[in-house]
Structures are given as C-alpha cells and as structure tokens.
Amino acid sequence: MSSHASRIRPARSRSRRQRLAAGAVLATTGLLGTYMAALRPQPTYAAPPGSAAHESDSRTRTGPRSLAPSSIPTCGQADITVTDDTGLRSAIVSSRDDSVICISGTITVLSDLPDLDDTTVTFVGDDSTVDVIDGQDYFALIAADFSGPGDDTVTIAGLGLSRGTAIASPGRNSGGAAYFVGRIGDEDALVIDGSLLTDSNAQLQGGAVYAKQGNVSITDSFLTGNYTATYGSAAWLQSSDVTVADTTISGNDALYAATVFSLYSTVNVSTVSMTGNYSTAGGNLYLSSSTARLENSFVGSNTTPGGVGGIFANGSDVDLVFTTVYGNSSVAGSPSELDLVAGSVDSWGSVVGSPSDDTTMRLTGGAVLDDTYSVSTGQGPGFSGPGSHDVTGGTLQLAVVDDTQTPGHGGRTPAVTSLLVTGAPTDDVDTGVNVDQVGNLRPGSGTTWTIGSRQVNFTPQPPTPPPAFPPSAPRDVTATPGDGSAVVSWTPPSDPGSFPVTNYRVIAQPGGPSCLVTAPTTTCTIEGLTNGRPYTFTVEALNGAGWGPPSRPSEPVTPEARIVALVLDQGVRVAAGAHDRIRTTGSSVNVPAGVRLTPHIRYSGQTSFSRGKATITVQSDGTFRWTRKIKKDRGLTAYVSWQDVDSNRVYWAKVR
C-alpha cells in the first residue's frame, strides 16, 4: 500500500468525499439512473422566444456550438460488450473509428487504462444496469490524445467514472477520470452525456476532466466529489470550445484554485448548478483569457478561504443571462461573488449578491457594461446600466420590472421579468409575485428553493439505496496436502449477492494461515503448514457488500515431508576401441520430469570426485539413462545428484 501513498487525498478532501458517500453508493448499487433523474436541472427555464434575452444584441458574444450527438448508441448496437478490466483494455487497444464499447456492470481498473490515439470511440453504459469504470483511487481512466491529424471524437454516455487518479509517476498527472487533447484547427471533440464523474483526483490540473484544444460538450451529467492539488477539481479547460448544459457541479475540492478552470477557451453554460464546491484560492469558476456565457444558471454556496468564492475573471469577458451568483464565501477583503481583472461583465436579468453586507463585486481594470434587470448587493461598484439595481445585502426582494413601473426597461411583462428573490428567503416574505421569468409558478411560502433569477426546484435527497448483500458461502472445498503446504480448491457460491464476486480467502485451521486470490480463480496454495499436523480449510467470498459467510470445512489433510530418492543401476562396462564405455540407467522418486542430474566420477587412485559433463535428464516416469566414455586401463566409481540428494555409488572395474 505504501507504493500508492502519493495517490491518497488530503484529510479535508476525504471528509468532503465522505459527505458525498451517498452519491458514490448510488454509482455502485443500481441507482445511478434514479439519482440523475432526481437531480438533473430542468432545461425549461430559458427566457421564452420573443423576450429580450432572445433578441439580437450587439453585446452578445457567441458561444461554441452544441456538440451533443443527435443520438447515443445503445449497448444493443455496440461493437463489443466488456465486463472486466481485461476486456476493456483489449477493446481500447483494438478500437477503430466509430467503435462502440459497451460497459456492463462495474469494471474495476487494475492499472492506468491505455490511451486512445486518433480514433473516434464511444463508451456507453448498458441500458439495464448502472455501469461504472472504477479506478479504486489508484489508476487513471479514459484518455484520448488526438494531437495527430484528423477529426476524432471520444464520447462517454450513460456511464459512471469513479475514483480515477492521475499522478506524475506512473502515468499522467492530469484528468483523473477523462483526459483529452485535441489538435488546433481540427474538429476533435470530447462528449460527456448523461454520466456521473465522481471521486476522481489529479496531482495537477483537472481532478475529473482535463481538456486541451478541441471541442468539449458536457450535458445531463454530474461532476461531484472530485479533487485536484492545483487547478480545476471538476474540470480544466484550455484552448477549447466548451458547452456545458443541464449539469450539476457540486462538492468538488481544489487544494489550490478553481472548481472549473478555463484558459484561452470559449465557454457556453446553460442550466447548470455549481454549488457547494471548495477551492483554497482563486475562484470556483476561474476564467483566464477566456470568453464565457452563463444562461439560466446558478453559482452559489461555494467556499474559497483564500480568494473569490464565486467567479474570478482575469482578462475575460463574461455574459450573465438570467443567472445568479449568490451566497458564496471568500477571504476577508475580497469580493464574495465576482472579481473582474480586465475584461468585462455584461448582465441581463441576473443577480450578483450575498445575504451579508460584504463586498460582492470588484473591478480591477475591467468594466460592467450596460445591464438590463440586474441586481448586485453589498459594497463595491455593482451594476451601472439602465434597469440595474444596487441594494444593501440581505434586503433583496422579489420584484416586477416593466415599462409601467420603470420606464426604459423594454416593456417586459411580469411573467418574464419577475426575476429576483429575497436575499435570504423566509416564510414571511410577501411580494405579490408568484411566477418566475418564464411564467412558471414559484413554490409557496416556507418552501426551500434555490436563490436565483431562474426558478429551480429544490434538489431532493437521493433515494435510499436498497440493501446490499454479500455472496453466499463457496462450496465443495477440497484440499491436497504437500510438503508444509496444501492446495485448496472449491466451487463458486450459488448466490454471488448484490455484486460480482471479486476475491476469495482461504483460512487453515488450526493456526489460521491464509491465502487470497482474485476471482474467478478457485484454487489457492497455503504455505507455512506444519508437517504431520492435520488441517481443515474454509473459503470465504468477497463482493462490493463485503465478505460472505465461510464455507463448510474441507476434510482434514496432513502435510508430510517429501521423500526424494535417486538410484543408479550397475549397468555394464564394455570395450570401445581406444576407450571403454559405461552404459547404465537409474530411477528417481519425487524428482520432477525434465530435471538434469549432475554426474560425479572418481578414477582408481584419485582421492576425490570430480563433476562430470554428461547431460542426464529425468523422464516422465522417473527413469534416466547415462552413457560415458572412460579411460580403458582404470576402474571408475560414480554417482548422480540433484539439489542435496545423492544416489548410491557404483564401481566399474576395468575390462580384462
């Protein structure tokens, strides 16, 4: 275990992961689909056609195109279905353009997965089960290096990627769950759709996702509980066109800075909730020399003890459209919600605020452009355009804004423009406004709901996972004794339990010596037994729910010391011209077939034996043959040996 010490996260990240344990359990207990359906943001909150948010505006910056595929292949259409680490590696190595790799069940990765190289491949989960690739906190998962020529796409659909780990040695050090490098000028793409990326970490950038150059699409997905030691616990995005839609980014932890880090990228965010994340410095959404547009999204309740809790934009242009940046925490003296260093922020129908009277927005060489229906709270420059409001923190109320109340606001109706909520929702707020900006009813008094300019249903608790069961006991345990050992065999359990069997453990009694093997192996050798002492053996099976009960004990067996013997026959000595020749045979006991015996010879008059050069090989029946030329005028004594066992000595007198 010590060799993997560098892969373990700090204690703070571990505790955060423990708080997300319910989500991790879901990824391995058949509830991923239910969990995603319960938590997925609804895409119906965009401003309706004809509203100002959809009208052409010279200030609007165009985001990247949507990369989500029109249809994701199902496992029934897949080229190959894999159920274990060996099958997955083989499928990756042998993949060709448009290959579909179907993941069925939970695949536990036993080392870093091989990289895809300029190949369009889809990884898709089986329709009927929850399907997960699990790196065990030791190994990196899906990687694609498309830096060569050509337009290639890697797609991850309906799949869980958990506990992927990218460290400096061995393997890569970025993108624990998904690593992607495209080629400038090509249409290379990474597509993540309907998937859960959880509990992954990286020594450098991108705890879950690392993407450099190319196009990135993340839709209908969850990035939770991921960690990085530097930038981008959920995602590091560099020189890319990025689309993120209908996605939750929560509970991620960056030791240095940023939950999502964007460098030289164009980012288009729609209906995304980014909440409950932690980064030591920077901002949870960190934009460097990038262009970003956030629509109908929420960035709130994030924590940055050494910087900005919400959005940090350095030399970047940011559009906020029906988006809320609210209730983030930061270091004293820094803005809690938005820090703009050069670049600009442009806002429509959005809220940037805090329930406390802290500084929420700061400009350093940047500019807030004219805004329509935007509100900031706390100290700092706030918004300045027509329709914008600066209010005291904690006093922000629901409002209806149109030409009848505030001239010059574009004539929106209350159904579209009732954008704002209280700084801290309470049971006694009475605003008279009960619809959101698209005309949907807001929840009633006392209902918990997300602060924001868009209406979001309260995130429900994940369903309680069903009980998980370990396997039943292995069957038909038998043992064969050896010298200080025994070989134990068994039959797999009749019921594997809630998950596939991963390991077997054999325990000897008395004394408790044991051995451990990986399924599907059903035999194991236990060493260190005492010869002459009888032993029985029991076997236990392990799955994701734990160890099952022990089997019935085997019949007792008694290890015995192995007797090894060599016998050299007298054979014959015959005259053979200038020399004589001896021809003899022999037999052995407990000497393996194929062993080469060592001959030893001593002529008459010699005081010691010397080693012969003949090749004497033990046959499968234990016999062997030896033929040798010897000096014609002298008698010869000889024997053969193997390891520390010598045969009898045989004397051949000279031929008269």
Image (spheres, rainbow, N blue to C red):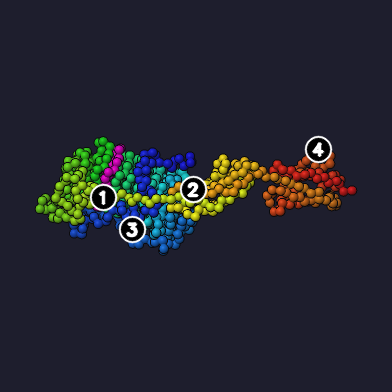
Q: Amino acid at mark 2?
A: Pro
Compare marks 2 and 4 and give the one earlier in the sequence. Answer: 2
Distance of label 3 from label 1 (alpha carbons): 27 Å
User: Which residue is under mark 3?
Assistant: 68
Residue 455, position as x, y percentages in the image: 22, 52
Q: Taking 45 as reference, is 265 left or right?
A: right
Q: Residue lying farthest top?
A: 332
- Residue 583 highlighted magenta (yes or no): no
Q: Amino acid at mark 4?
A: Thr
**Which mark is on residue 549?**
2
Q: Viewed as shown, does residue 144 lie left or right of 282?
A: right
The spot of residue 449 in percent (x, y) is: 24, 48
Question: Which residue has dot 4 on it?
Answer: 607
User: In front here: 129 or 160?
Assistant: 129
In this rendered view, identify the residue nearer to me: 79 or 75.
75
Residue pictured at 17% horizontal, 41% vertical: 392
Q: Residue 444, position in %: x, y?
A: 19, 50
Instruction: Say if 228 sits above or below 54 in the image.
Output: above
- The disc, 2 or 1, on the residue closer to the chain's N-terminal end is 1
Disc 1 element: loop
Evaluate whether residue 457 shows in this view.
yes
Residue type, label 1: Phe
Which residue extends farthest right? 656
Q: Quadrant of residue 315?
A: top left
Outermost residue to the bottom:
77
Under tag 2, what secondary structure?
A: loop
The region drawn magenta spans: 294-313
Distance of mark 2 from mark 1, alpha carbons?
43 Å
Q: CA distance from mark 2 to mark 4?
A: 66 Å
Near-viewer residue (631 or 550): 550
Image depth: mark 3 or mark 1 in front = 1
